[in-house]
Image (tube, coloured by chain):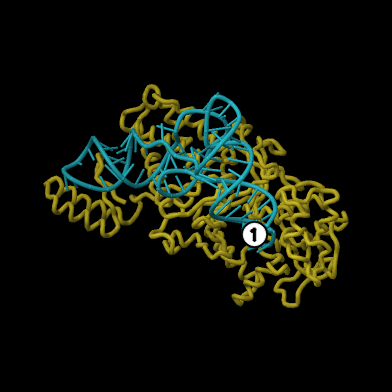
Chain colours: A yellow, B cyan
Amino acid sequence: MKAQQDQLVIYNSLKGEKEVFKPLVEGHIGMYVCGPTLYSEPHMGNMRTFINFDLIYRYLLHLGFSVKYVRNITDAGHITNSAGQEVDSIGEAAKAAQMQSLEIVYKYAVKFQELQRIYNLLPPSIEPTATQHIQEQIEIIEQILANGYAYEVNGSVYFDTRRYMQDYHYGILSGRKVDELENETRALNAQDEKRFFADFALWKRANPNDMQIWRSPWGNGNPGWHIECTAMSTKYLGKQFDIHGGGMDLKFPHHEDEIAQSCGSFGCNPARYWMHANMLNVNGQKMSKSFGNYFLPKQILEGTTGLFEKSYSANVVRFFMMQAHYRSNLDFTQEALNAAEKGLSKLTDALATLTRLQGAEKSSFDVEALVASFYKAMNDDFNAPILVANLFEATRLINLVNDGKEQISVADLVLLKEKMSAFVFDVLGLQQENSNSESRLAPVMDLVLDLRQQARTNKDWTTSDQIRDGLAKAGIVVKDGKEGTTWS
RNA sequence: GGUCUCAUGGCCGAGCGGUUAGGCACCGGUCUGCAAAACCGUCUACAGCAGUUCGAAUCUGCUUGAGACCUCCA
């Protein structure tokens, strides 16, 4: 695995190019990913990012790295709204629902946990929340103040972007130039306490109607939106760690500001590799709350999105996402989902076939090269679609062996079983579908199919077709194969 | 308006200068009492125009179209 670890290449958003991945400490990786803000239920687009980073986490584990994976939960913080005001979105949502802030956060945290289970996300090593780390946030703000990169006004603290730009490069990640931004950004209004339009809040003094308030050296208030990630990543991974990830839409300003905060307090960019997952589209447009074109992860399982004629399992949705690269946009369409459903069943059928194959003297094709192609795909910036294509090549060969047209040696059979299973289940995170034989229906179906088989033996096609059609109406498909009749 | 990204066959989607990625659909075949399913095979596309090159989906320029960010968003 060491050899494979050394060949891993990652696209680093900070440089805008692929780089050979070298962890700070050999064999160990610290990874931080920005998690959800729990003022509403995460939608399918949110889930795509978490599924993609789950894939990345899983592959790093498969390569034998020891990974500390931190993904936060945002349960407090003031953001800047379209009017340029700092607002507490969780508090607003809580008020609208006539709940407490903690109540609404807890409600959606439970849902998010459930979604993680359904979509087969491995739990991160730590899932810290902002409210548990107010003290750490305050300490970092104090450090930034002490370093001269922030100023206090009336109980609020702002990051001093102009001062920062004298020593560091603001825009290093997003490529934005502050003087270009200035012309296109709303003007500072008279009441604004900021000295400069690009300054952002580190700490915001309390409003009379705030639901949550914390004490600080600057009086009662709330942390700013960006400081929590700096506090939590630093606490659990150190001042500098290997990978920082998140959705593409967080690149600016959130991640840019995280870099500024880390440089402003500790003098270094927090992460060596910045990774950004791309958005999920519906009809060519980013799925988002503000566009109103979103659906919930549970709706697709229940077939209630209003967009598709039928429901799809979490496994199918996950497989569908694995057929697009994490840095590409992905369009959700019914035809594409149907294609994923059929493709997945072809792949899982082949895995079942693989367990039944008999090993021969020697292989008629290069199994080691096939397995190497799995690693090659994933080592190239986690190219899951190429991996899937290679798994389908394996599927074709497995079926040919099954038909007696190709051969595989006993040793190669062991290798292929191990690697197919590892990449399909451990890396792609697909789940073994429940076998029909386990259901309560199984004994009944055995009986019915037995009766139908008797009719077929007697060439009583009327009866046998009657049973088949009747079952079809109940949603059960009967398949007559060479080795007997199966159903699903 | 500014910054950036993208445009691939019926659909989804890889591709990073020279081997038809892959999946689904379509079509042909094997199997089957007939179907369905399964399996095998077939299907040579890269927005337009110009340029660089022995060679371009891939590099450069222009044109057209779409999207993201610039304000919260995964």
Q: Is residue B45 above or below residue A156?
A: above
Residue situated in front as seen by the camera: A264 or A190: A190
Quarter of the image where the N terminus of chain A is located: top right
The residue closer to the viewer here, A418 or A60, is A60
Label 1 chain ID: A
Residue shown at 57% from the left, 61% from the top = A288
Could you tell me how many numbered marks the image carries? 1
Q: Residue at x 31, y 32 (%)?
A: A403
Which percent across, then down, holds residue A401?
35, 30
User: Which quadrant of the structure image shows residue B40?
Assistant: top left
Picture coordinates of residue A19 (x, y %)?
A: 66, 37
Horizontal arrangement in the rendering, residue A58 relative to residue A197 (left or right):
left
What x and y, as percent, mark residue A189? Answer: 78, 70
**Mark 1 = which residue?**
A73
Q: Amino acid at mark 1?
A: Ile
**Left or right side of A145 for A479:** left
- Callout 1: SS: loop
Query: Percent x, y for residue A170?
Result: 78, 51
- Which quarter of the figure has residue A64? top right
Q: Is residue A322 left or right of residue A153?
A: left
A447 vs A272: above or below: below
The answer to whether one can see residue A295 in this image is yes
Q: Would you identify the image quadrant in which residue A92 lies?
A: bottom right
